[in-house]
Image (spheres, rainbow, N blue to C red):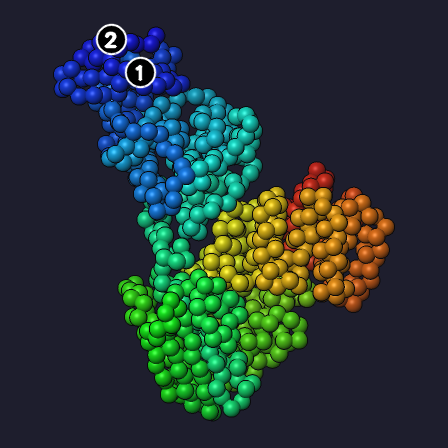
Amino acid sequence: MSLSAGTRLGPYEILAPIGAGGMGEVYKARDTRLDRVVAIKMVNPRFIERFEREARAIAALNHPNICALHDIGADYLVMEYIEGSPLKGPLPPEKALPVALQIAAALEAAHAKGITHRDLKPANILVSSTGIKLLDFGLAKLSRDSDGADTDATQTIAGTVLGTAAYMSPEQAAGKPADARSDIFSFGAVLYELLSGRRAFQGETQITTMAAILHKDPEPLQAPPNFAGIVTRCLRKSPGERFQSAAEVKAALEKTRYAESVPHAAPSIAVLPFVNMSADKEHEYFSDGLSEEIINALTKLPGLRVIARTSAFRFRGEQDLRKVGETLQVTNVLEGSVRRAGNRLRITAQLIKVADDSHLWSERYDRELTDIFAIQDDISSAIAAQLKISLTGVQPAAKRAVNPAAYEACLEGRHHLYKLNPSSMAKAVQCYERALAVDSDCALAYQGLAQYYAALTLLGLVDPREFLPKAKAAAQRALELDPAQADSHASLGVVSAFLEFDWTATEQHFRRALALNPAAPDGRLLYAVAYLRPMGRLGDALVELEHVLEQDPLAVLPRSEKAFTLLLLQRYDAAAESAQRALDIDPSHVLGLAVMAMVRSVQKRFEEAIAIAERSIQLQGRWSLPLVNLASVRALAGHVEQARALLAEIHELSGRNRVSTIALASIYANLNEKDPALEWLEKAVEQREPTAATAIRLSPVFDPLRSDPRYSVLLHKMNLA
């Protein structure tokens, strides 16, 4: 029965109703003894046991962000009255952060007492003038009762679904036991809504909402990557993949510095390729290599946003530094020159403030080639001093011996390797072998060989079963000589993923690579496409790809990979936008064209899709990837004869060049030919084709095959069942 104003409950006088919930009603009241305003929660007799347990849960807690319990009656709770309103988004990240920290602190306090809330949602979080208050422990689970026995504050039978549908964890939605990690999932859902203004999981009914929680990822947040990454990790389906405690979440939030995530707020720099002033113009590889080494050194400075090589080197010879700053969104540019005569070097470097073209610092170094690492460290320290970057906590670079001939050969090898075409890559391996001929313990050469073998595989130019073991051996030898080589760990991650299907080892290698060099865009790109996507963690993959593009905004490959990831998420308009941005940078990029054609096909815009696929052939020639793309589009458009003619051409090509088995399977699937599609998928797994894991697990092209028992066998073979 509802209480009217003036009703007395012992010393408490009811003033007005506040609201009603599942367990009862809440009133504003006055404590006549202490003359203070309180909130009284009247409990429905059906929930009296739950009421008693809620009282015990709140009584166990004393925290400024948790609503305090003042008193208890036979069927009511007396709590502090809070002038405030329920939490509501969207909020900008700088305002959401302190709110998130207070919620995390409240959860940390509750979990420390063995209490799991289990109904965390915006309606149970009040925003007041003094901060955040967490309310309503009516569904709380106490891990230990007073007698030491495990208890559940709701005393439910297994399989009962508890909580509010839009915010419950997957295990709650499935009626399974919940622990503190369930609150962390709900916290992620609350934080997602706080930042975006929309729910992470939406459905027309509770059933469809819970289905989304169990099987779908929310759309990526438009938030700073660090913040978005925390939310994404909270929302992982498996409890073991989330933060394991509220303390971990709070620590991650405390480390989040938005100045580092917002391009304009933090010091930022682009290192332009140093000008080769040597008599031998072929030595450009050396000046480029020095520029890249400086980039790598600068990435270790905390709080400095450093543009990656791919984007910075697009401005070779650019005189208008303001154009560089505006395009790359940086505040500073480093430029310089290298003059070499034998083993003597003259290196000049100057740091320029983009806003007014003022020279902040310049220096000239006349040294021997053996001093090259010391020069790089000196330049990094000078830049840190000029930009007022604290070096506290930065580990000094290890002393590195250098064989001048081997080092030079490695720089030349890397120069050729980055071009990613077969003839240039053949020159790269010759350079690395030359380096090892003069220094058999050159870790940099082994690292280069590992990247070379892995790159050949990823480009589809060689048999992975032959070349990935070579990549593994080279990377392992590199790490024996220099355990701090991040790129070698990334190469081992590629091997573990595509050759061995060892996903635990894959994650360990990539995490180690990112720990050694968090700002390495290549490592993050590989982590996204070789581990996160095959694991089905598409939201996490997008976060990593956004990190890459923040550092490398003009890089085409990660933008195309982002487009493909959005395609897998069925976010077709966003996928087309990302693919178009890649094509704006490089109109002939084969992956960007392929993704754009696939998106238009899915959208039933077949004329556009065919035109895009045909343009790809005009730009790239009649080789397997553009031909496969056109064949798939023709098949989806119902142009069966044209698709079969293209398929025959592709099979004829396979006698001379490697052709993607996954691509062949996709054509047969689009032609509704199930058996040959599955046969080619089986070959893709046997041959360790790099795209197999993601395609077989996630590509919508293969949806009609998923009910076939042979499909499940393929997932088992890749340890993805």
Quadrant of the rendering where the C terminus is positioned: top right
Q: Position of residue 699 (x, y in %)?
A: 65, 47
Quarter residue 709 falls in:
top right
Q: Is residue 112 left or right of residue 34?
A: right
Q: Is residue 284 left or right of residue 707?
A: left
In front: 266, or 303? Answer: 266
Residue 374 visible in the displayed image: no
In front: 654, or 332? Answer: 332
Residue 650 visible in the displayed image: yes
The circle on residue 34 is none
Helix, strand or loop for disc 1? strand
Residue name at image x 29 percent, y 66 percent: 388
Q: Amino acid at mark 2?
A: Thr
Nearer-N-terminus badge (2/1): 2
Residue name at image x 56 percent, y 66 percent: 472
Q: Which residue is mark 2?
A: 7
Q: Position of residue 90 (x, y in %)?
A: 41, 39
Q: Residues within 10 Å of mark 1 (few under 14, many from 20)?
A: some
